[in-house]
Amino acid sequence: MNYLFLFLAVAVGYLIALFLKKKELRNMEVFLAFSGAFLLSITVFELLPEVFETPSKNIGVYIMLGILLQIFLEFFSKGAEHGHVHLHSETKHFPWILFISLSIHAFMEGFPISEENNLLLAIIIHKIPVAIILSFFFITAGYRRSTTLFFLFFFALMTPLGSFISTNYNIVHHYETEITAVVIGIFLHVSTTILFESSKNHKFNLTKMTAVVVAVLIAYFL
């Protein structure tokens, strides 16, 4: 059932994008701020304590590797992981580089999902606004519907695939702490960037600040 929820998060984002107008994307900034704050809070409240149950400097190394990996991926994706999308309307060829970088990101974020944490909910909340913005720009850039659906379908499969492999392959369990630490680094970079970019001129208004505070409180009491 978790796999279905993860897949449907992208599908819901696409369906919403079909009915959006450009000016309505401004309202996504509050949702993005909420999703970024919620993802960051789950990472800090649940994942960080988990990997530091046995304190080790090596864990910090893996977290930094995750941050660096995300920076590398965003060199190709141009920040699509946090709703910062620029597609060029002059070409309608399939954007393979964007697809591969986003797929690696989505695949990795599925690994730490378990019954012991609330990461599933955090990723669903994270994926919906990103899928909305990504779908909207694909549509408005003039990509064929088949191209858009192909991209989104396989992008939607990546996180469930990562979660499935993590659950069913023993070799992954052997390196569970290290992999989770890498994903923590990815989440720290993505979530803080969402918070940074969702504020005009790097300033929060009351609505966004309220969304962030509410997200943190919900994550804390879950």
Image (cartoon, rainbow, N blue to C red):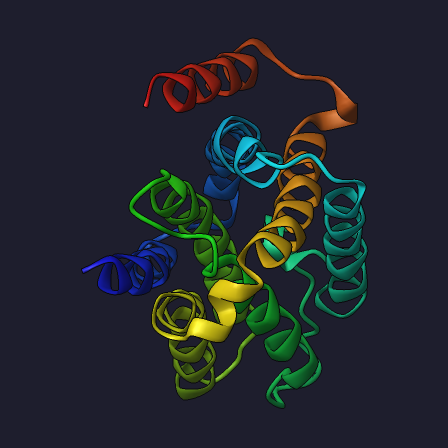
Horizontally, residue 173 falls left or right of residue 88, namely left
Name the residue nearer the viewer: 52 or 94: 52
Residue at horizontal 58 percent and vertical 52 percent from the top: 177
The spot of residue 146 in percent (x, y) is: 40, 87
The residue at the far left in this view is 1
Q: Is residue 65 left or right of residue 195?
A: right
Q: Nearer the viewer, residue 209 or 123?
A: 123
Residue at position x 68%, y 85% from top? 91
Please say if 6 is above or below 37.
below
Looking at the rendering, which quadrant does residue 74 occupy? bottom right
The residue most toward the front is 54
Query: Which residue is more in the foreground, 5 or 146?
Result: 5
Quadrant for the C terminus, please. top left
> From this viewpoint, which residue is outermost toward the top?
206
The structure residue drawn at horizontal position 50% and vertical position 69%, both measured from the top left corner, is 172
State the quadrant of the N terminus.
bottom left
Residue 131 in which image quadrant: bottom left
In-image side of 188 versus 177 (left or right): right
Residue 210: percent from the left, percent from the top? 49, 12
Q: How many marks?
A: 0
**Residue displayed at 31% across by 65% down:** 7
Q: Is residue 84 above or below residue 175?
A: above
